[in-house]
Image (tube, helix red, strand yellow):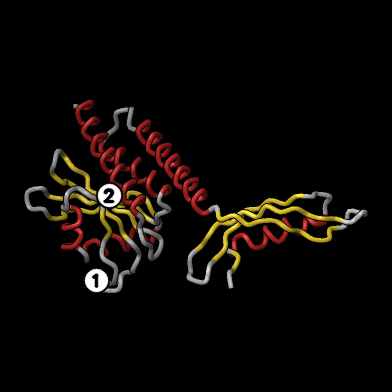
Amino acid sequence: THRLHSDDAGALHQAVDAALASHADTFLAEYRLWRDDGTMRWLQCDARIFRDANGVALRMTGILRDITARKLREDADAAETRRQQFLAALDEQFRVPVDTLDVLQASANALIGYLDARAVGFVAIDAATARIVSLRTLVGDTAGQRLLPLKLRAFGVAAQRKLLTAGAAATLPRGRPRRSIGDAAVLLAPILRGRVVVGGLWIEAPSERDWTASDLAVAEMVASRTAAAIEHARAELA
C-alpha cells in the first residue's frame, strides 16, 4: 500500500473536508506519497465534486497525475536561486576592504546559516610541510567549539590529505577516531593562495549527515571567494 507523506496528510485531509463542505464543484491538490519500494512521488489530484439539488456532496471523481519531475525541477530552480542570492550577498560584504579575520568571520557567519551547521571554523596549513598548524572556531555553539578542534586533530592525517587534494571540498571519514568525541559530519573546503593550499574552512553539521554535492559546491565557492577577498584586502591595506 502507498502511504501519504506525514507532512502532507493533515493538510490534504483538511482540504478534502473543506471542499466537500463548501459549494465548490472542483478540487485541486498536490501532495507526496511514499511507494512500496521506499521512493517518494509527487501527485496532483484534479477532481470534480458532484452534489445533489441541496448542494450536498455525493461523490468526488477525478484523475491523479505524477508531477514528480516538475517538482524536482522547481526545487532545483529554487535551490539555485537561493544559492546565487547567498553568494551575491557574500560578494557584497567583501566589496569593502577588511582584514583577514573579518573576511573569515563573514564567510563563517554566512555558511553556518546556509548549510544549517553547528559550527564553522578555519584551519591553517603550513604550505612547506603540508601540516595543519592551527585551528580556530569562528562561529558555532559551545559543543561545536569544544569538539571540532579535537575531531580535526584526531583525524589529522585524513584532514590534511582531504584539504590537499586538488583544492576540492571533501568530507571527513565517519566514525570515532581514537577517542569518543562525537560522530557529527564534517566538511572541509580548502583555501588556496595561487595553487597552494594554505588553509581551509571546516563546517560541522549538528548531527550525522550526508553532505550533498550541492553542499560541497557551495563550500568550495565560499572558500574560493574567501581566498580572493583575503588577497584583495591585503592588497588594499598594504
Q: Residues within 10 Å of mark 2 (few under 14, many from 20)?
A: many
Q: Quadrant of the C terminus?
A: top left
Q: Secondary structure at mark 1?
A: loop
Mark 1 and mark 2 in contact (Cβ < 8 Å)? no
Report which residue position mark 2 lands on. Answer: 201
Which amino acid, mark 1? Pro
Residue at horizontal 18 percent and vertical 42 percent from the top? 192
Nearer the observer, 178 or 71: 71
**Of the image marks 2 and 1, the number of the one nearer the N terminus:** 1
Report which residue position mark 1 lands on. Answer: 177
The answer to whether residue 124 is above or below residue 155 is: above
Marks 2 and 1 sit apart, C-alpha to C-alpha, by 21 Å
Residue at horizontal 85 percent and vertical 55 percent from the top? 51
Nearer the observer, 129 or 48: 48
Nearer the observer, 74 or 225: 74
Q: Residues within 10 Å of mark 1 (few under 14, many from 20)?
A: some
Q: Quadrant of the N terminus?
A: bottom right
Residue 214 as seen in the image, left or right of residue 171: right
Q: Secondary structure at mark 2?
A: strand
